[in-house]
Image (tube, grey):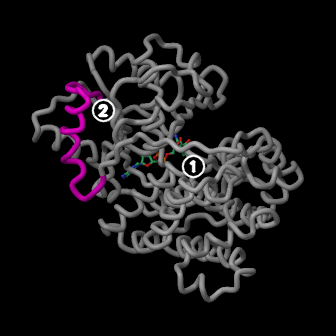
Amino acid sequence: MAKDYYEFFCPVKIVAGLKALEHVPYELSSHGSSNPLIITDKGVRSVGLVDHVTKAMDAAQVSVAGIYEDVPPDSSTSVVTQCARYYREQGADSIVAIGGGSVIDTAKAVNILVSEGGDDLKAYSGAGNLKRPLKPFFVIPTTAGTGSETTLVSVIKDDDTGTKMPFVSHFLLPDVAVLDPRMTLSLPPKITAATAMDALTHAVEAFTCLAKNPVSDSYATAAIKKISENLVDVLNEPSNVEGRLELAQAATMAGIAFSNSMVGLVHALGHNVGAVAHVPHGVCMSILMPYVLEFNLAERADTIGDLLLHLAGPDVYASIPSTQRAEKAIERIREMKEQVYSICQLPRTLSETGAVQRSDLPKIAQMSLDDASMLLNPIDATYEQALEILQQAF
Ligand code: NAD
């Protein structure tokens, strides 16, 4: 499935740092945006994060067309249509998304409708169905996980069928992503942990999948190092601003990495655990990652061994014989899971989620075989192998 060439593309301007938010008005004006619509969700708004941004806009006398705050966790076609209608009513000229992956994916889909016109979102689902640039689009992530601020993907539920529709196009990439640690300080420990493990999985799978390439590898390994060095510190000290910024940058870098390679079997299984049992995406990733890496050892032991350098640092890496590094890298991920569990009880197994039943596993295994993420896993898992991994992770 891997091609004999690779491409790398990331045109998103990244503005990152302790005062990055103050730069938002400049970015808006340099894209000709004078009346942006803010898209967010109630959870993000209730902890005052939208106020940080509007304060920075007020200081630069930038007006806002309106604030749409009704994005649910599992955004759907009707939400996107409703938000696009509000955009038009308010005469907005651009979009500022303030939130986690749910808000960012919704804002990407809204941008399709307000740029292309009409309400028929489904007409643009799939890959490559957008042919021209969309309205100016700015993203301010409030979780450090999905990397959606630098990916060319959005996933939206079809209200008619209940299925999730992917939208894939370079035109969905934001113009600017603003990473400011003030936006993640209020994240509860469990969401901090789950989203960071989501980012770690993006980086690990980008580095181990069949479409890995030297440029995506550089982003993936830098992201793995930042998460390994900062996650536990941030969980122990949630107000650690420097650590929060490191995690935000890691999530963005992991997004760049997997958007330019792919993911693999952790995502194939995890998407379907989420679909069947409604377990948050990052929790699924965290649970399944070591089991899938063990499965992939047969084809990718050297690559998995290379992860150890970025997960544990040069001293540990140098002290372990090369034949044992892959097992040690997996052990290191298990240790991280244990540390995270002891701080915030992020589930380590599918049974610990309390949402997955053993009887769900055959259905999840079957659905995973059709997941696009399976295509570039180093081993094309059979139904029996997928089920075996799920049983181990139970
Ligand atoms: P989320 O956006 O669903 O947010 C989870 C919860 O955290 C929400 O209740 C939200 O209100 C709250 N929250 C967010 N930031 C907060 C903050 N700073 N303080 C307090 N509360 C806060 O979670 P997520 O994990 O960021 O996103 C998950 C979604 O992202 C899924 O829909 C998934 O499909 C999607 N996703 C997209 C991509 C992509 O490349 N497009 C990649 C991975 C995942």
Query: Which label sits in the foreground, 2 or 1?
Result: 1
**Going 64% across and 66% down the picture, which residue do you hit?**
348
Q: Around disc 1, counting alpha carbons within 10 Å, would you say few (fewer than 14), some (14 to 19), or many (20 or more)?
A: many
Q: How many marks?
A: 2
Q: Position of residue 321 (x, y in %)?
A: 70, 86
Q: Residue 207: which quarter of the image? A: bottom right
Question: In the image, which disc is placed on residue 258?
Answer: 1
* Residue under numbered circle 2: 38
The verdict on label 1 being within 8 Å of ligand 1 is yes
Is residue 33 shown in magenta? yes
Q: Residue furthest right?
A: 384
Q: Is residue 385 above or below residue 7?
A: below
**Going 73% across and 40% down the picture, which residue do you hit?**
371
SS of the residue at dot 1? helix
Q: Position of residue 110 (x, y in %)?
A: 43, 25
Residues shaded magenta: 16-37
Q: Position of residue 241 (x, y in %)?
A: 30, 65
